[in-house]
Every structure is written in structure tokens, then in C-alpha cells.
């Protein structure tokens, strides 16, 4: 996953940093210190002077681990996993609640270890799945760890180690991503453009811009929070796939539609090269075999199988071109290829387009049986494509049921 590290590697980094902090009298008065001191007292050491450093490292390492566990269970530390070839964010409430996971083993191994899955197929499907933390979120949890120990225990990190941590755990803002969207120039950021594709609602874009301005001004690395806010807004307010928020692919649909427009050269996108330099127009060829990521102000990454390196950051999209493109799509003829099952180029890239086309045909008087048959064939075609392998058969059935429901609604006097 671009810009991310394994959960257990994140924990080890935090442990190593936390072990450089001081142990105070308030630390020594905690039940945890007492329990560990009793444990260490029964251990033999070749050099008795090693006992105290060992106890300190044990105590401070667990302190870092508990901060990570708390971040996962409360949702303040977003975690991702590779599910059927696609990275998805795990819902903290559904996966990290009480009696839902083995927190110690999960954090130490970096794999999701579920508990009590006899009535929960979803968590059972994620058993032993690798967990990833975005670099920006790692910086945020590091800052929280230092502030927590300083506030509650009076513990300090020596300045030389603070400087070292700032260097090692650099944030996106260290690479210059601090600029909020400049609507005066008629430009949208990647999150604004994605929510437009998902909603075709200028009010939603304005709300997203307000959210970006707020986070950019209040956080060292605002993009993880912006990413979560974007996903939540689309899943809860503009979802058209009918899935639960954790399974909603509408943001992904919008992202793919936007990328397709960029590959076709229909939008003049500008960005800052990953290696630095002045803002420039991003060649449309750069979008081929690449991914649009809501990080670093909106970044273009090469696909992981091709190296996964960043190509451009701080992407900007001309508002007028984006809106005109949507108007052209809405005024165009019926999407070609919907009834063409040859797999030729030009098939619709969005499930939303499919639903709109089937609804038009049902309104025009076609039978539900014929439309449903073609829908099933088209869904099978989508499942065969690499970008849509995550879509389970159950999800396809859900959409087909929506088509049937719409047919019944439109046919009802």
C-alpha cells in the first residue's frame, strides 16, 4: 500500500521511540509498573544492573502498545487491509469493539485476530489479514503518544531523540502540502472532484472544501482525516450502490470515472512533481496504470505492481472542465456497450451508469426478465475485470434486486 507500513512495524517504531522517554515517579506508582516489577524480580540476570533497564524497556514498550490499541478501538488510528486485491479501510466499530478482537496478538503480529466470530461472517473473512497504517496517521499517533505521556506522567523525550523522530516520521506537510484549495482560480482538489463525481452537488463540494480548510489549519498532516471524511460523506449521503457504509464502492466508482476522464485527456490536471519543482500540467499518459490517492493534497501513484512510487502530488482539477464533463455525460445518448457483451472497450466504468441505463429501459417498457438477464451478464463481465474483482456475487445480486425493485416501482400505477 503506497505511503503505509505494516501495523506491527508501526508498533515497533513507537516502542523504540517511547523507550527513549523518561520514567517518572508517577510511572512507578502505577499498577502496571508494580506488576511488571514483581515479574522482573523473579528473573535472574547475569549482571544485576541490567534489571532496571529491562524493567524500563518492558514498561515503556507496553505503554506504546496500549496507545496503539486505544487508537484502533476508538477509530482515531485508521487501519487498512488488502481484501481481494484492493485496499479497504476497516470499520473500527465493527472490528475493534469489545470481545471482537485479540488486541495484544493483533498489534504485535500486524494481523487481524478476531474473537467470537460464530455469528459474524464479515470479521471471520478478515481473519489473519495484514493490517496497514498510513504514514500520516503514524505521525499523528506518535504525537499523541508523546503528548499523552507528557500530560499524564510528566515523561519527556530528550531533544536529540525528538529531532530524530521528526526526521524519521516526517509528515506530508514536510513535503510542502499545506495549501488549501484555491476556489478563486476555479480549481478543485482531488477530494472535491471525487465528491462531485459521486454527488453532482455543488453544495457537497463546498462542504468538502470547508472540511479541508478546517483540517489543513489545525493538523500537522490533515489528509488522513480528509480521506475519512470524504469516504463517510459519500457512503452515508450519496451512496447509490445500496451497500452498507463499510462495503460502499461509490467513492471508488467516482475515483475510477475521474481517472478515466484524465486518461482520455478530457480534464487539464496540474500537479507538483514528486521530485519537486514548479506546478505543471500532468500528461494524460501519466494516469495510465496509476492510482489517484487522497494523500499529499491528492497524489498520483504508480500502481503497486509497477513500483508504487509517487508521480505527482497536490493535484488540482479545473472546476469548469469537471462540471462540463458531467453535463456532457448527462446529455449524451444511452451509454454504449450496455447491451454489448463482447467485452470491447467502451463499457461503462460506473455501476451508477448501469443503474441509470436499466431504469431508462424499464421506463421505456422493456420487460423485467430481459433487463435482469442482461444485468446478470454484465455483472459477470465486471467481475472478470481486475478492477472489479472485489465485488462479490452477493453484491451483484443486491444491484440486480435494486433493478427489480425499481421495475416494480415504475410499473406501479
Image: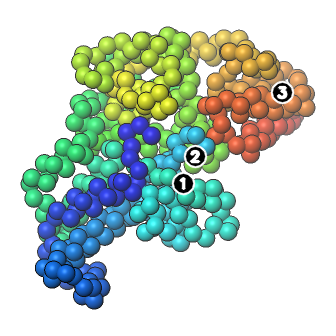
**Residue 36 quadrant:** bottom left
Precedes in sequence: disc 2 or disc 3: 2
Residue 149 locus on image (x, y percent): 21, 66
Q: Specify whether 143 is left or right of 298.
A: left
- C-alpha span from label 3 to label 1: 35 Å
Q: Are marks 3 and 1 in contact (CB under 8 Å)?
A: no
Q: Secondary structure at mark 3?
A: helix
Tell me which colouring the rendered structure shows: rainbow
Residue behind mark 1 = 129
Q: Does residue 31 appear anywhere in the picture?
A: no
The C terminus appears in which quarter of the rendering?
Answer: top right
Q: Nearer the viewer, mark 2 or mark 3?
A: 2
Q: Specify whether 109 is left or right of 47.
A: right
| Category of crowding for the residue at label 3, using alpha-carbon neighbours closer than 10 angstroms: few (below 14), some (14–19), many (at least 20) | some
| Category of crowding for the residue at label 1, using alpha-carbon neighbours closer than 10 angstroms: few (below 14), some (14–19), many (at least 20) | some
Precedes in sequence: disc 1 or disc 2: 2
Q: Nearer the viewer, residue 226 or 146?
A: 146
Residue behind mark 2 = 83
Residue 226 locus on image (x, y percent): 39, 40
Q: Are marks 1 and 2 in contact (CB under 8 Å)?
A: yes
For the point 49% across and 63% down, which residue is it?
Answer: 96
The answer to whether residue 260 is above or below residue 392 is above
Q: Specify whether 236 is left or right of 157.
A: right
Q: Nearer the viewer, mark 3 or mark 1?
A: 1
Precedes in sequence: disc 3 or disc 1: 1
Q: Does residue 289 appear anywhere in the picture?
A: yes
Residue behind mark 3 = 374
Query: Which dot marks residue 350?
Result: none
- C-alpha span from label 1 to label 2: 8 Å
Q: Secondary structure at mark 1?
A: loop
For the point 43% across and 30% down, which residue is it?
Answer: 307
Amino acid at each position: 500500500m503506497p505511503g503505509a507500513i505494516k501495523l506491527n512495524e508501526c508498533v515497533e517504531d513507537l516502542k523504540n521511540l517511547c523507550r527513549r522517554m523518561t520514567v517518572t515517579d508517577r510511572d512507578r506508582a502505577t499498577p502496571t509498573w508494580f506488576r511488571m516489577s514483581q515479574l522482573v524480580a523473579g528473573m535472574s540476570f547475569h549482571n544485576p544492573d541490567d534489571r532496571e533497564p529491562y524493567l524500563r524497556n518492558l514498561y515503556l514498550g507496553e505503554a506504546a502498545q496500549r496507545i496503539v490499541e486505544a487508537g484502533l478501538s476508538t477509530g482515531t488510528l485508521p487501519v487498512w487491509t488488502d481484501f481481494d486485491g484492493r485496499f479497504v479501510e476497516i470499520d473500527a466499530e465493527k472490528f475493534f469493539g469489545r470481545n471482537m478482537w485479540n488486541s495484544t496478538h493483533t498489534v504485535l503480529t500486524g494481523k487481524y485476530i478476531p474473537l467470537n466470530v460464530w455469528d459474524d461472517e464479515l470479521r471471520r473473512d478478515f481473519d489473519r489479514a495484514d493490517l496497514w497504517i498510513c504514514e500520516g496517521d503514524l505521525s499523528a499517533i506518535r504525537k499523541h503518544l508523546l503528548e499523552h505521556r507528557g500530560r499524564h506522567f510528566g515523561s519527556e523525550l530528550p531533544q536529540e531523540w525528538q529531532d530524530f523522530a521528526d526526521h524519521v516520521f516526517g509528515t506530508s506537510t514536510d513535503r510542502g502540502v499545506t495549501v488549501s484549495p484555491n476556489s478563486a482560480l476555479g480549481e478543485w482538489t482531488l477530494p472535491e472532484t471525487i465528491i462531485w463525481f459521486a454527488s453532482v452537488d455543488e453544495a457537497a463540494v463546498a462542504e468538502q472544501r470547508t472540511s479541508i480548510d478546517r483540517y489543513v489549519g489545525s493538523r500537522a498532516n490533515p489528509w488522513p482525516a480528509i480521506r475519512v471524511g470524504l469516504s463517510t460523506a459519500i457512503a452515508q449521503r450519496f451512496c447509490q450502490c445500496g451497500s452498507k457504509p463499510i462495503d460502499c464502492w461509490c467513492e471508488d466508482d467516482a475515483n475510477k470515472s475521474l481517472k478515466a476522464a484524465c486518461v482520455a485527456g478530457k480534464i487539464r490536471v496540474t500537479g507538483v512533481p514528486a521530485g519537486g519543482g514548479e506546478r505543471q500540467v500532468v500528461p494524460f499518459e501519466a494516469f495510465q496504470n496509476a492510482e489517484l490517492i487522497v494523500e499529499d493534497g491528492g497524489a498520483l501513484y504508480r500502481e503497486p505492481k509497477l513500483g508504487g512510487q509517487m508521480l505527482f502530488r497536490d493535484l488540482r482539477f479545473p472546476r469548469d472542465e469537471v462540471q462540463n464533463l458531467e453535463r456532457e455525460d448527462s446529455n449524451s445518448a444511452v451509454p454504449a456497450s450496455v447491451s454489448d457483451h463482447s467485452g470491447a472497450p467502451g463499457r461503462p466504468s460506473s455501476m451508477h451508469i448501469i443503474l441509470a441505463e436499466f431504469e431508462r429501459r424499464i421506463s421505456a417498457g422493456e420487460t423485467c426478465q430481459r433487463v435482469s438477464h442482461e444485468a446478470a451478464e454484465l455483472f459477470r463481465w465486471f467481475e472478470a475485470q481486475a478492477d472489479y474483482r472485489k465485488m462479490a456475487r452477493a453484491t451483484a445480486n443486491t444491484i440486480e434486486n435494486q433493478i427489480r425493485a425499481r421495475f416494480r416501482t415504475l410499473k406501479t400505477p
